[in-house]
Amino acid sequence: MSNYFSVLSGWMIPISRALEAWNIDIQEVIEQCDLKPEEFKDPESRLAAEKMSQVIEYCDKVKGRKDFAIAVAEQFHPGMFHALGYAMMSSDTLKDAYIRIARYKRVVSNTCTLSVDTRGNHVHFIMDIAYYEDSQRPVLTQGCILCFLATMLQFTRETLKSDYSPLEIHLNWPEPSYDINALKEFFNCEFVFDCDEISLVFDDESLSKQLPGGNPLIMQTHEKILNDYLSRIDKNDVEQLVKNRIYEMLPLGTPSQTEIASQLAMSLRNLQRKLNEKNTSFRDILENTRKSLALEYIQQHHLTFSEIGYLVGFSNIGNFNRAFKRWTGCTPGAYRKENSGFVIPTSDHETNTLPS
């Protein structure tokens, strides 16, 4: 069971650097934690979640401290998250980046689910930890949880080039008896223990400001890599497979469910059954994929609305405009103007036909 739950071996990038910073021999860690040297080299391999827990606990024990998780987070590098790290760095806002890692979290790990919940003026970035079926023990230790949350905060600071801090950190365990001053110093916010959730709490306004490094074109390139990667690591995830096929086929027109089933070498009934087991449908996946792509393309000022409609599978600009208004509550022109101040090209108002 322990090998079922895994993390991306990219975590070995900051772990190696943290070991060097703490003057701990990496070969010693490899031997004591039963690691394989190649796990420090292959960025696409997977590491059993238990191994990462052992590394953090071992290093804490060696130094008689409880903050190796922070040392790892301070060595953040976007490559540790595969292409996801770079997609996050090129996101339009930090909120978008957090939503992106929640969407693609399986690239980093299958030990938890992540979600972004806006509550009034606050944004909660929530971790829901998986449990081992046999013992009902959490898959991630407290050290691993703190390591991930600290890494996300370090990512935020690297992106903003500032000492930005969350409003609070919520943890679902009692306040520990050991000294947590190092943790408090790093997070620089109020710790709330014995909570119903594990989360970082941010101010919505600061998380929603546009990032100077935002680049939708680069972000989409990395998302394509991520979708391909997810297909390789989980060939049984029919929802992801359908999404990937839709991505590929949309520029040629809206694919039918029958066409997608054929592409996946399934019968139509079998595809419908498998999607129903996932509590979704082809229509839902198509709609969500179109919406996601449209919102990303709208940030690319060189694309007209006709071109965007074409890229997301609409043959008529009127149909695209109606769909976009259904998704966002406003027209593509109003959305682009509100989010970027871009002047709407008049050509999009002069024709109802998209490029053939």
Image (cartoon, rainbow, N blue to C red):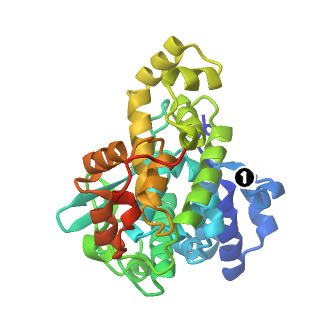
Residue type marked 1: Glu
Q: In this rendered view, identify the residue nearer to me: 7 or 207.
A: 207
Quarter of the figure that contains the C terminus: top right
Q: Which residue lies furthest to the bottom in this view?
A: 162
Name the residue at 53% across, 20% down.
258
On screen, residue 345 above or below 117? below
Q: Is residue 276 left or right of residue 38?
A: left
Evaluate whether residue 350 shows in this view: yes
Where is residue 182? Give x, y as percent: 45, 80
- Left or right position of 80 against 213: right
Secondary structure category for the residue under label 1:
loop
Q: Residue at horizontal 40%, vertical 57%?
A: 295
Residue 12, position in %: x, y?
Answer: 69, 63
Residue at (41% x, 71% y) in the render? 178
The quarter of the image holding the N terminus is top right
Q: Toward which corner of the image does residue 278 lie, by quadrant?
A: top left
Q: Name the residue under label 1.
A: 44
Question: Residue 340: which quarter of the image?
Answer: bottom left
In front: 272, or 4? Answer: 272
Q: Position of residue 272 (x, y in %)?
A: 46, 18
